[in-house]
Image (cartoon, rainbow, N blue to C red):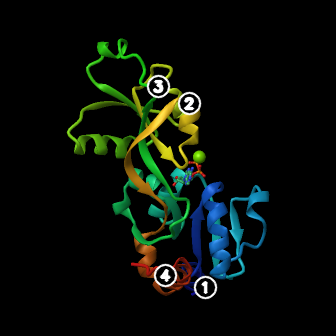
Amino acid sequence: MEGTVSKKLSSENIVIALTKGRILKEVLPLFASAGIIPAEDIAKSRKLIFDTNLPNLRLMIIRGADVPTYVEFGSADIGIVGKDVLVEYGAERFYEPLDLKLAKCRLMTAEPNPSIDKTDKSQRTRVRVATKFTRITSEYFASRGEQVDLVKLNGALELAPSLGLADVIVDIVDSGMTLKANGLEAKEVVLEVSSRVIVNKGSMKIKNSQIRKILTQLSEKVGSDYK
Ligand code: ADP
Ligand code: MG
């Protein structure tokens, strides 16, 4: 019997996964306005799990690319993640009830400006594209009927063209200043990005009333209904 009781209690606990950096910075004020307040200063702590003012709600701080994984497998019930990371992982694996409209940016193609001497490139038959988001990028070029070679990089993408590693990059663009500082120019929008709330499909069923309560609180503050 005791086992049943503790199982019931734990099924009522909600864990929200999010990341340090830009998303945490923009989401914490939203959480506060929705009445969700961490028990201690997350930015100053090395802990990975935080209690909140709400007895059954905890926050988990992990790497952005890991948020979908933790939510898909149910270690977290809810996640807050950039649309870029979500689409790259596979958005169909989650409920995606709410666009928080925070951490807005774009995934864009960018090329050297002025364009680099192409003599080197003429040896190659295909355009080479460097990106962290290989799935989104390959689907983007495929949808345009363009065959490209992808190079997966995890950071400092702006270097790739000048070093001859790639002709084009697909990267996050906000102001475009980083690109400009590296002699690149943003060209085409691949994906409009903002932070999304994702929910584990099982959690949505089992913990429905609590999750709805959180979604309602957040959506009221964001100013749009959740799906
Ligand atoms: P990381 O460097 O680990 O990707 P960031 O905090 O830089 O972590 O980015 C987290 C998320 O914030 C990204 O997945 C994207 O959705 C969004 N983001 C990244 N860069 C920007 C930016 N310059 N402006 C607005 N949003 C951004
Ligand atoms: Mg970053």
| Residue 128, image x, y percentages | 36, 27
CA–CA distance in space, label 3 to label 2: 9 Å
Which numbered circle lies on residue 2? 1
Above or below residue 213? Residue 183 is above
Q: Are marks 2 and 4 in contact (CB under 8 Å)?
A: no
Identify the secondary structure beneath mark 1: helix
Q: Amino acid at mark 3?
A: Pro
Asked if one can make out residue 31 in the rendered structure from this viewpoint, the answer is: yes
Residue bearing the label numbered 4: 207
Of the image marks 3 and 1, the number of the one nearer the N terminus: 1
Looking at the figure, which quarter contains the N terminus?
A: bottom right
CA–CA distance in space, label 4 to label 1: 20 Å
Quarter holding residue 90 = bottom left
CA–CA distance in space, label 3 to label 1: 62 Å
Question: How dense is the environment of label 4, judged by Cα within 10 Å: few (below 14), some, or many (20 and up)?
Answer: some
| Residue 50, image x, y percentages | 70, 68
Check the image and name the residue furthest to the left: 145
Residue beneath the point at 46% across and 79% down: 224
Of the image marks 2 and 4, the number of the one nearer the N terminus: 2
Identify the secondary structure beneath mark 3: loop
Residue beneath the point at 23% across and 42% down: 144
Q: Amino acid at mark 4?
A: Lys
Identify the secondary structure beneath mark 2: loop
CA–CA distance in space, label 1 to label 2: 62 Å
Residue bearing the label numbered 2: 182
Residue beneath the point at 36% across and 17% down: 118
